[in-house]
Image (spheres, rainbow, N blue to C red):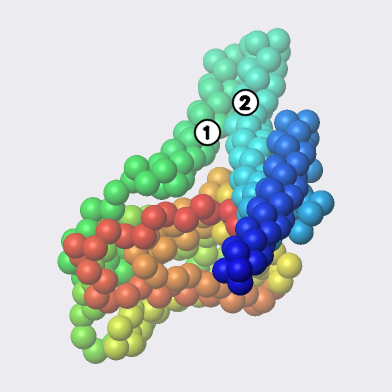
Amino acid sequence: MSSLVLGLVLILALLLLAFALAGKISACKASLDKFIIHCDNTEIDSLIHPFEPEHQCHLLAAVFTAHAAMFKRLQNSTSRIRQFSGDASHELRTPLTIMRGETEVALRWGKTAEDYRSTLISNMEEIERMGRIIEDLLTLAKSESGKLPLSISHLSLSDLLQEMYVQARKLAADKNIEVHLQHKVDKEIWLNGDDLRLRQLFWNLLSNALRYTPEHGTICIKLECTATSAIVSIQDTGIGIEPEHIEHIFERFYRTDVARNRTHGGTGLGLAIAKWIVESHHGSIHVESAVDVGSTFEVTLPLDWDNGAAPPAPLPLKP
Ligand code: ADP
């Protein structure tokens, strides 16, 4: 008798449990149906807000929150792409507009061979400028898609900087800028790195130092070393960078003063490329600057990252 009662109680309990589960499942299903309708009819901007299930279902709530976070990331990268295409088109349109204007003037008013020659010279400058922008854009695009492998060798950083110093001195002479090289180490510094890319990195920093330092200024290239890293700093006595710009200068096409930087011939991509090169060598770069005093760019490169290990995936350059 007692086992019969026990059996009945058990069956009753099972039925209650089944009802409760069925209720929960149908509540979850209703939430899922609403979620599907929400996704079907909503713009991407609204999908970044977490969808609240009407019934408390922790698993669904977690899924909806993860979904909203995923859309937030997607929205960020779409707006970065939009911003980037806008910037790139603008940068390429400017030299085209200048070329068209000057060619129209020459066609309408040009009389002598000299008139046409000076238009062609100016057009040539703009063509070179577009070429530099396209080259830099290609470098960044390939770096982001991982299609720009580094060619790593064991190289003397001391020699590399010595050569860069000689080149910088030649260009600096035109502006009466002094260039110094300080080896703050008593031995030659060797590391694993891509020779061409490291030259590009230091050249981007040095050409900026030359560009943004007025006549009779000074540029100092310093090489120091810790037990694990080489530290190269490039210090100038130039115009400096205002504090509000500092956190943005490694972004593509960011300039502190668009009009002035254009006349100086920069593409606005040099520091973005420098950052990519440093990070793909497992290093870091940072800047300190004061307006009308000067700027110091400091690059830290590890001495002994494993040549065989793949460098980290290149990072997107705009945060
Ligand atoms: P650009 O080709 O315009 O120089 P970069 O990416 O190399 O582009 O630099 C981004 C911006 O950072 C520059 O437009 C300039 O405003 C600022 N900048 C970079 N280096 C220096 C420097 N040494 N002194 C002052 N401003 C600098």
**Quadrant (top left, top right, bottom left, bottom right) of the C terminus:** bottom right
Residue at the right extreme? 54
Q: Is residue 83 left or right of residue 46?
A: left
The kind of secondary structure element at disc 1 is helix
In the image, 93: left or right of 197? right
Q: Is residue 135 above or below residue 281?
A: above
Looking at the image, tell me whether mark 1 or mark 2 is earlier in sequence order: 2
Res 61 visible:
no
The kind of residue on which mark 2 rests is Leu
Kindly tell me whether residue 124 is visible in this rendering. yes
Q: Secondary structure at mark 2?
A: helix
Q: For mark 1, what is the residue?
A: 130
Identify which residue is drawn at 65% across, 11% down.
107
> Which residue matches tag 2?
96
Q: Residues within 10 Å of mark 1 (few under 14, many from 20)?
A: some
Task: Return the residue nearer the eye: 31 or 286.
Answer: 31
Task: Say which amino acid is labelled 1.
Answer: Met
Q: Where is residue 37 shown, x and y percent of the image?
A: 76, 33
- Quadrant in the picture for the N terminus: bottom right
- The single residue placed furthest to the front in the displayed view is 1
State if disc 2 and disc 1 touch (CB < 8 Å). yes
Residue 191 in the image: x percent, y percent? 23, 72
